[in-house]
């Protein structure tokens, strides 16, 4: 039996005693017995320790839902706002698995721009979109040409706190939810591939009367749920309701939030019932997201129409509900019988 030297014993028992021999041998294949023992010992000792450390660090991190719920209006500035925005972007990309946009498209330089009041936001938007005119309660805007997002934190905070108080919710716990909704809503507009093919495209039976050309113009392309002709476009309010519906459903179903707040302009005759309607009739979050993201306007109209009562053509029934939402027309929405399909509405 060969004599075991003191050097070999030390190599076997000391941490990482095998490294020098690996360097000389140029790999693991020709190591001595003591070096092999040293490797096995280090694996047994250090790998469980590292794994335990990583698991403990992971356990220390708050779930995303708790980060959202604990984010305050006082934190909505400076580096804390930047960090929160980045986490919201990471979660959007993780949950959607989108291939249409990357993280840099969401939070790259000047991609997301926050302002303290309406005047500041409008002034900034008009630098890239001179014709911009805000709606009454508008707190956010996505400019498609520059692919920039603009958010008025002052108006957003005012709206959300007002909603919270009307629902007897602590206003101090609204900032993270409001910011999450605002960012996911605006990014939803960017997470879209336009479509210029379909049976309604260039079809003389489907058109808008354009005030710009003063003539009827056929459909030319879809972007999300918006329909464009040569000089005009339609269903812009339904587009906003759909994007907000997707954001709200994702916040509830995937993040696990119980209370959410929604844009004031799109809530009445829109977000007040459309998320519940889609859930009641079995149109899933993923279906809504995919059809919007791929600009499958015709598929969306058809699937909505298929869920509505009566033997009419699905396209006709679905279009009627979309028009009712776009016009914020409660009477037209009621006539589609969509509200009768929502259990809570039937009880009331």
Image (cartoon, rainbow, N blue to C red):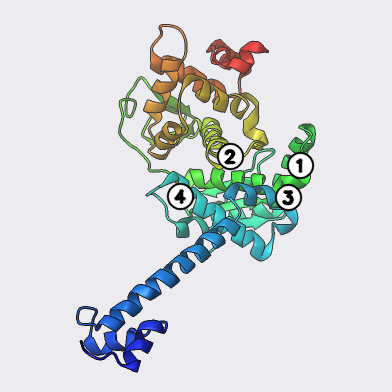
Label 3 environment density (alpha carbons within 10 Å; few <14, some 14–19, many ≥20): some
Considering every residue shown, the one lying at the far front of the view is: 1
Q: Nearer the viewer, mark 3 or mark 1?
A: 1
Q: Nearer the viewer, mark 4 or mark 3?
A: 4
Q: Nearer the viewer, residue 278 or 223?
A: 278
Question: Please, what secondary structure does the residue beneath circle 4 have?
Answer: helix
Q: Is residue 317 above or below residue 114?
A: above
**On-image quarter of the N terminus:** bottom left
Residue underneath mark 4: 94
Q: In the rendered image, is residue 131 in sight?
A: no
Label 2 environment density (alpha carbons within 10 Å; few <14, some 14–19, many ≥20): few
**Which of the 4 image quadrants contains residue 272?**
top right
The label number, if any, that marks residue 256 in the structure image: 2
Q: In the rendered image, is residue 45 in sight?
A: yes
Q: Is residue 152 above or below residue 201?
A: below
The label number, if any, that marks residue 235 in the structure image: none
Residue underneath mark 1: 161
Q: CA distance from mark 2 to mark 4?
A: 15 Å
Residue underneath mark 3: 154
Q: Nearer the viewer, residue 123 or 216?
A: 123
Q: CA distance from mark 2 to mark 1?
A: 21 Å
């Amino acid at each position: 039996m060969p004599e075991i030297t003191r050097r070999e014993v030390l190599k076997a028992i000391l941490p990482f005693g095998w490294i020098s021999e690996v360097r000389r041998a140029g790999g693991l294949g020709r190591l001595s017995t003591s070096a092999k023992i040293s490797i096995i010992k280090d694996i047994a000792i250090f790998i469980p320790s590292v794994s335990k450390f990583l698991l403990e660090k992971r356990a220390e991190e708050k779930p995303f839902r708790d980060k959202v719920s604990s984010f305050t209006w006082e934190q909505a500035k400076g580096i804390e706002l930047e960090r929160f925005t980045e986490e919201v972007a990471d979660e959007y990309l993780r949950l959607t698995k989108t291939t249409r946009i990357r993280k840099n498209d969401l939070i790259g330089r000047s991609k997301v721009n926050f302002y303290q009041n309406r005047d500041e936001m409008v002034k900034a938007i008009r630098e890239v979109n001179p014709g911009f005119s805000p709606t009454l309660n508008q707190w956010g805007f996505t400019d498609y040409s520059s692919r920039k997002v603009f958010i008025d934190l002052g108006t957003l905070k005012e709206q959300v706190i007002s909603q919270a108080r009307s629902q007897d919710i602590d206003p101090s716990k609204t900032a993270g939810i409001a910011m999450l909704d605002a960012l996911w809503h605006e990014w939803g507009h960017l997470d879209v591939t336009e479509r210029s093919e379909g049976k309604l495209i260039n079809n003389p039976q489907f058109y808008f009367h354009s005030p710009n050309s003063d003539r009827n113009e056929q459909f030319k392309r879809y972007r999300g749920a918006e329909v464009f002709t040569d000089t005009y476009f339609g269903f812009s309010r339904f587009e906003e309701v759909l994007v907000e519906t997707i954001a709200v459903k994702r916040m509830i179903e995937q993040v696990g939030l119980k209370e959410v707040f929604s844009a004031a302009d799109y809530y009445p005759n829109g977000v007040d019932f459309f998320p519940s309607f889609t859930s009641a009739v079995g149109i899933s979050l993923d279906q809504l997201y995919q059809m919007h993201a791929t600009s499958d306007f015709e598929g969306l109209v058809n699937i909505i129409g298929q869920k509505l009562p009566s033997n009419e053509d699905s396209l006709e029934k679905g279009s009627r509900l979309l028009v009712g939402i776009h016009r914020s027309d409660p009477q037209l929405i009621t006539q589609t019988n969509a509200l009768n399909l929502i259990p809570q509405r039937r009880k009331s």
